[in-house]
Amino acid sequence: QVQLVESGGGLVQPGGSLTLSCAASGSIAGRVDIDWFRQAPGKERELAATISSTGTTSYVDSAKGRFTISRGDAQNTVYLQMNDLKPEDTAVYFCHMSMNNNGHYTHAWGRGTQVTVSS
């Protein structure tokens, strides 16, 4: 029942920046962890960034120092600020939510937004 909608993708030159947004709606309950996954053509899905219910963040090694994941003030939107973008960052970026409601886990996925880094 939870819906996630990503936005903010587009075409950017190497070294440029983009900010992705993930807006959540529906029956959100419990402790919520949100991830940004990405998948490039011909490659497996990769976890790019995570923010936990307590605010702890983590990133794939290739994105450390360049990506920042954060929650909006209303806690219904999550952002991924991407700086110094590289061609290897080209992928469809998916928002994923994991909800732990007293031990009952629920997951939701967005449909993805395309990020293309090219000169």
Image: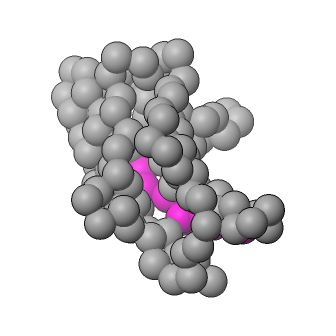
The region drawn magenta spans 106-114
Spot occupied by residue 62 in the image (x, y as percentages of width and height): 48, 17
34 lies left or right of 12: right
Residue lying farthest right? Answer: 103
When asked about the image quadrant of residue 118, the answer is top left
Q: Quadrant of the N terminus?
A: bottom right
Q: Please state which of residues 119 and 77 is positioned toward the viewer in this rendering.
A: 77
Q: Quadrant of the C terminus?
A: top left
Q: Is residue 64 magenta?
A: no
At x 63%, y 35%, the residue is 46
When asked about the image quadrant of residue 2, the answer is bottom right
Q: Is residue 30 above or below residue 98?
A: below
Residue 82 visible in the current orientation: yes
Q: Is residue 111 above or below residue 26?
A: above
At x 61%, y 67%, the residue is 30
The secondary structure that most of the magenta stretch takes on is strand
Q: How is the image coloured?
A: one colour
When asked about the image quadrant of residue 5, the answer is bottom left
